[in-house]
Image (spheres, rainbow, N blue to C red):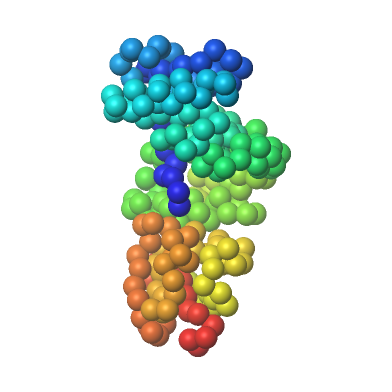
Amino acid sequence: MHSLPLFVKLVGRPVIVLGEGEAAQAKRRLLERAGAVIVGEEALAALAIVAMEEEEEEAALAAVTRLRARGILVNAVDRPALCDFTLPAIVDRDPVIVAIGTGGASAGLAKIIRQRIEALLPPTIGPLANALAAARGKMRTLWPTPEQRRRALDAALAEGGPLDPLSGAEGEAVTRWLEAGGTSQAVGRRETIILASADPDDLTLRAARLLSEADTIGHHPAVPSAILNRARADAHRFVSATPPDQDGEGLTLWIIMKDDI
């Protein structure tokens, strides 16, 4: 992973923007949508965007150097080698935000991916997220522990579930789900993934989904870290040459390479 994606709250906070062309104006509009206060180079700020034209290469490099010397993180438009951070293509379903980045490799590719994702996500996803936020107290009552709440939400939000976000489910669906008592999935289950390849890009859709859902992951020592990096960061993990003797709560996943069976 070449960069760590972060969502930064900029409401009322200063951001330096240098440049006068079309690219600079586009960045100003984007930052203003996020509530940032656009300031000049001499102002105090934590972030800066240098959006100078191609013929201003020397001036752009000098500006980046000055800003970095002050400890400011810099985005240099169309100059990926000078960037401390990049601005992704954005799908906005407030409060749900999907960001697509290529590390500056191709803004055009990020745009096309954004357009594809935008067509998949219904406008109801934003209201659904707000309804789930408002229902936190009720969910804590129904499922006292974080693990119980996560499993219930995973089941409800899964494909075909009562809160499937791609089905057009809205806030009212959350109310109906909770009034019906929800689904806790308290019974544990075990699934096995047999890997034919050590390349994470060769994972099947099923394997990728199970990795993202598993509460506990047991794996053969030969399973590479590149595969395990696709799993939930908070999943309990253990290494063993043999499958676990018993299943815990939620989903227990056993992973082994095909050659090690």
Q: Report the residue at 46% width, 20% height from top.
A: 59
Residue 176 showing in the rendered view: no
In the rendered image, residue 64, in percent from the top left (x then y), is placed at 40, 26
In the rendered image, residue 91, in percent from the top left (x then y), is placed at 60, 34
Q: Is residue 217 above or below residue 257?
A: above
Judge by depth and name the residue closer to the eye, 142 or 105.
Answer: 105
In the rendered image, residue 99, in percent from the top left (x then y), is placed at 54, 38
Horizontal side, residue 163 vs residue 48: left or right: right
Q: Report the residue at 43% width, 61% height from top.
A: 229
Residue 259 showing in the rendered view: yes
Residue furthest out toward the left: 70
Q: Is residue 153 above or below residue 130?
A: below
Judge by depth and name the residue closer to the eye, 81 or 212.
Answer: 81
In the rendered image, residue 153, in percent from the top left (x then y), is placed at 49, 50
Residue furthest out toward the bottom: 261
Res 175 quadrant in image: top right
